Amino acid sequence: MPVYDYRCQACGVRFQARHGFNDPAPACPACQQASVQRLIVTAPAIARGMLTLAGDSRGATKEQLRAKWAEETPRLRRKLVDKLGEDVVNRHAPTLNTTYE
Ligand SMILES: [Zn+2]
């Protein structure tokens, strides 16, 4: 299951939660408020993660990160759309529609 980053809108605490793609957001572990906001992961952060998995993120230039993003994102997006549908992907993975700046 994927790990998501959240920030509590009541007390400002940042935390991570592991849960399924379509599960509701968890309550804040510090104050139990349900008003938590999922932090959107940025394209550069994901591209760096892809390179880390490939074993070569150290010293990666911005051009390499951008190339990796352009190469991997359409493939990943297509896979998700096949599995979950266009609508779900647009709603839950808007980062995949962005370009690397
Ligand atoms: Zn809180």
Image: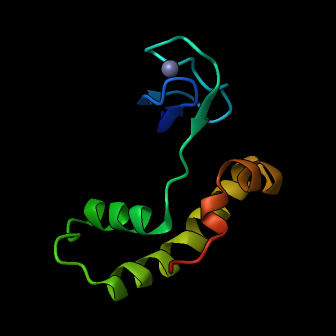
Q: Residue at x 36, y 88 (%)?
A: 63
Q: Looking at the image, how many numbered discs can be counted on the residues? A: 0
Q: Is residue 86 above or below residue 71?
A: above
Q: Is residue 73 left or right of residue 23?
A: left
Q: Is residue 2 among the parts visible in the rendering?
A: no
Q: Is residue 36 above or below residue 57?
A: above
Q: Is residue 88 left or right of residue 69?
A: right
Q: Nearer the viewer, residue 60 or 79?
A: 60
Q: Nearer the viewer, residue 32 or 59?
A: 32
Q: Residue at x 67, y 68 (%)?
A: 97
Please provide percent x and percent y for residue 75: 57, 70
| Outermost residue toward the right in this view | 87
Please provide percent x and percent y for residue 26: 57, 21
Q: Quadrant of residue 58?
A: bottom left
Q: Residue at x 75, y 50 (%)?
A: 91
Q: Is residue 5 among the parts visible in the rendering?
A: yes
Q: Nearer the viewer, residue 97 or 10?
A: 10
